Image (cartoon, rainbow, N blue to C red):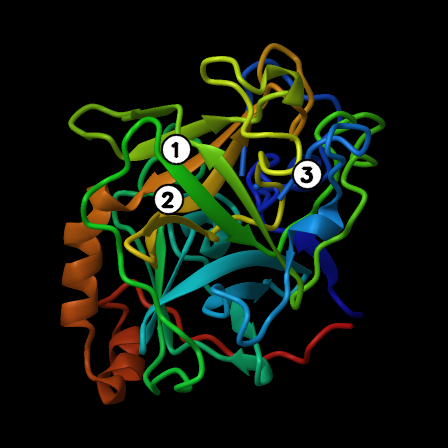
Amino acid sequence: MPSTLRPIHAQWLGLAASAIALLYPGAALANEYTPLVMAGSENGSPPDSPANHVDIPGAGSSFNGVASVRIDDGQYTYIGSAVAIDRHWVLTAGHNYDTNHDGLLDQGLSSEIIFNTGYGVTTLTPTAAYVNPQYTGFDNPYISFDLTLVYFANALPSYIPTYSLYREGLSVGDQIYFVGYGYSGYGDVSGEGGDNNLTVRPDYETRRVGSNIVDSIYSDRPGADNHVYELDFDDPSTVGMPGGSLGNDIEAMTAPGDSGGPAFVFVNGEYYVAGITTYGQSVDGIPYCAFGTLFGGMNIYAYLDWIDYTMATVPEPSQIALLMGLGTLPLLILRRRKRLH
C-alpha cells in the first residue's frame, strides 16, 4: 500500500511529528511543544493569505537552495524542509531523521531531498545523514541540538545555490526570514476544529516565506549557551506597539512540514542561514499556529563547531558502506523509494 503523507513534526510545528496524535493534534495543551508558514488574518488590513507567501522558483527567487525532505519509514511518508549549505551538504532538523524521538538516527529509512528551481524539480538521494550527537530526541527532555547534516557523495548540481552560515549569532530584535514546505493557514483561525485551520496542505514543490522578529535566545540544558531562538506570532492589532506585529501581511509563523527549513538573516545584500526551524509551542491553551503562540529553532552560531567538524571529517565515499556494515559510525545509507503522488 502507498504510504500516508504526514508532516514531520514532534507535536505540532508545521514540520514533523512523533506520533499520530502529534501529527494531527486536537486542542493544544498549555505550553506544549511540537515540531513545525502560517499567514496573518484574511480579514486584516491589509488582508493576507497563504498564497501571498508562496515563493516562485526561478531567477526571481532567493530561495532555490531550500528543499523539501521526503522521509519514508515503510509505514508513513513524512515531509520536512532543508537548506543547502555546501555543494555536498544539506542541513535540516534532527527529528526529521528521528521520527520516534529517541535521539538516534532511525534505521531503515529512505530519504529524498527535493529542490524546486528555475530548472524544474530535482530529486536527490543522500549518501548519509549525521544527527547531532548531543540531540536526545524531540523535547526528550530538551529542545536543543535538534539538527541533522545530510551528505551527498556527488556534488549538488551547479544550478542549486548554497548559503553561508551566519557566524555572528542571532540577537534579540533581529528580523529573520523563514522558508519551508509545510502546511499553511490563517493565524486567527488556527487550531479550531482539529487541524481544519491548516487550510493548505503541504507538498514537496511549494515553499512559502514568512518573517518575524527574534524575541528571545536561550538554552534549555545545563552547560549549553544560547542554543535556541524563539519568536511569537503577534496579532496584527499590535502593529506599532513595542514588540508588536510587523504587519498583518508580513508577520508569519511556521507550521507542520516546515521543520528543518532555514531561518535567514539578510546582511549586506546576502541571505545567511542563522537558524533551523524545529518547534512550535502553544501558550496558555491557545491553539497551535494561532496568534499569540510561539515557535523557534536552533541558533546556528551555537552549533558551528559541530557543523564545521562534521563537514571536514566525513569519510571517503568508498568507506561509508563499509563503516556502516561494521556499525562504527552513526551513518545511514538511504535508498530511493518510488515517489508518491
* Residue under numbered circle 1: 143
Sort mark 3 into few (<14), some (14-19) or many (20+) by Cα contacts within 10 Å.
Answer: many
Sort mark 2 into few (<14), some (14-19) or many (20+) by Cα contacts within 10 Å.
Answer: many
Mark 3 vs mark 1: in front: 3
Image-quadrant location for residue 171 = top left
Frontmost residue, 340 versus 264: 264
Mark 3 vs mark 2: in front: 3
Residue 146 is tagged as 2
Tags 1 and 2 touching, CB below 8 Å: yes
* Residue under numbered circle 3: 39
At 85% from the left edge and 27% from the top edge, which residue is drawn?
A: 193
Query: Could you tell me which secondary element the residue under label 1 belongs to?
Result: loop
Q: Is residue 93 above or below residue 248?
A: below
Residue 18 is tagged as none
At 34% from the left edge and 85% from the top edge, which residue is drawn?
A: 155
State which quarter of the image contains the C terminus: bottom right
